[in-house]
Amino acid sequence: MFSTGHYRILSTLSRTGPQSRTDLARALGLSKASVSALVRELIEQRILDERERVFGTGRPSVMLGLREDAASFIGISLQADPAHVVLTDPHGRVCVRRTLPLLSDPDECMSALAQIVREISAAIPEGAGAPAGIGIVLAGMVSRDRLTCLASATLGWVNVDVSARLSALTGLPVFVENDANALIVGEQLFGDSGDYADFSLVFVSEGIGGAHVIGGKLHRGRHGGAGEMSHSPIAFEGNALPCRCGNRGCLETLASLPAILGAARRAGLGEDIESLVTVAAEGHPEALSILHRAGAALGIALAQTVQMLDPGRIVVMLDPPLAESVFARALRQEMEAHVLRRAGEETEVLVRPLHPDDFASGAASLAAQHFLFGNESL
């Protein structure tokens, strides 16, 4: 088992890249002798390796880095059908991909997942490490200890101990998280936003999810529901649409993919988002109106996020056709129009396409996070 000192070295090298023993001792406030002893154990366990020598005044420094074959991580997305499964290396790069049907019966689902974990473990590429853990992402509420699915409407699960069930079948530690939280953990570890102590992430898919990193830590809230945007009220006029949650005017009824496609069908503008975006790009007024209204609704929600949390960046992950459409332009314009101007830097909005692998890669990052940071990541 790793000690706190081991985890501190791993987390530092993960975030900053290769460093010398002297640099690590200075950064961690430890003696060089203590760091050398911890590093020696990590090298013996084939987790760290020595890199190039850096010459300066005095003796040359040997740089230390995380080995490519230190471990691999399995990520499973139960966010939609089909389920996506990936194997990633310690830097978040996908090495193996698989899909399987999404099963709602917990026993059948765990059995199928255990089988595909065995298949992936047997297909590890040369040079990759053995799996060190499994992450699972789903749409729903997850316990604060990341072990139990408290409720998932997509799967029909209530209080399913996912971690214990799948760990018993695979022999690997299993960590469970909701979809938005997994995406932001992946972004923090392996994306472009890891240097931000305060940033938010929002995605638009069948629903709309949000998550926040505050002070370098994932913010869960008292009951684990922080970042839930789908059911935030946006529309209050008399014709506000009913939502599946029982309320009216929720963000989901205006800006989710089903809401956008429903409006497109009612206007006779096709059955898929690509067709709608194409028609809008050709100047069709109703198509433009649908996308603009949906993007503006999300922009208002983002403005509220900026006003309440003041993040340094908001990462917005959209279905690829939406990322380059009037939807993305409208959300930027509406957000900027509703944010109180402050002195100094403003919140950056980074729009990025959302791909099927992203949720599974985010799930793998849960296992990577625990491997690198231990219980500090919980």
Image (cartoon, rainbow, N blue to C red):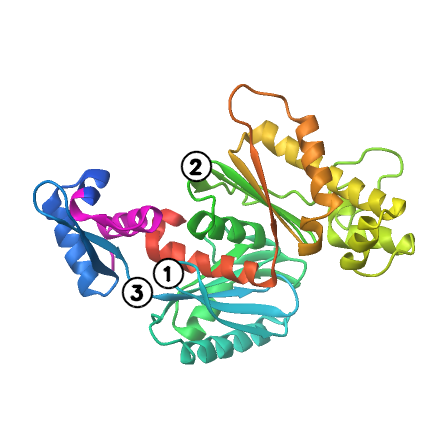
Farthest left residue in view: 58
239 with respect to 181 (left or right): right
What is the secondary structure assignment of the residue under circle 2? loop
Task: Name the residue carrying label 2.
Answer: 197
Predominant secondary structure in magenta?
helix
State the CA–CA distance, disc 3 to disc 2.
Answer: 27 Å
Task: Name the residue carrying label 3.
Answer: 70
Question: Marks 1 and 3: in contact by CB < 8 Å?
Answer: yes
Q: Nearer the viewer, residue 56 or 31?
A: 56
Task: Name the residue carrying label 1.
Answer: 90
What's the residue type where badge 1 is placed? Pro
State the CA–CA distance, disc 3 to disc 1.
Answer: 7 Å
Image spot of residue 120 (x, y percent): 46, 76
Q: Quadrant of the N terminus?
A: bottom left
Residue 46 against residue 335 in the figure, above or below: below
Q: Is residue 246 visible?
A: no
293 with respect to 28 (left or right): right
Image spot of residue 178 (x, y percent): 56, 54
Dot placed on the residue nearer the N-terminal end, 3 or 1: 3
Q: Nearer the viewer, residue 35 or 50?
A: 50
Q: Is residue 8 magenta?
A: yes
Looking at the rendering, the stretch of residues picked out in magenta corresponds to 1-22
What's the residue type where badge 3 is placed? Ala
Question: Marks 2 and 1: in contact by CB < 8 Å?
Answer: no
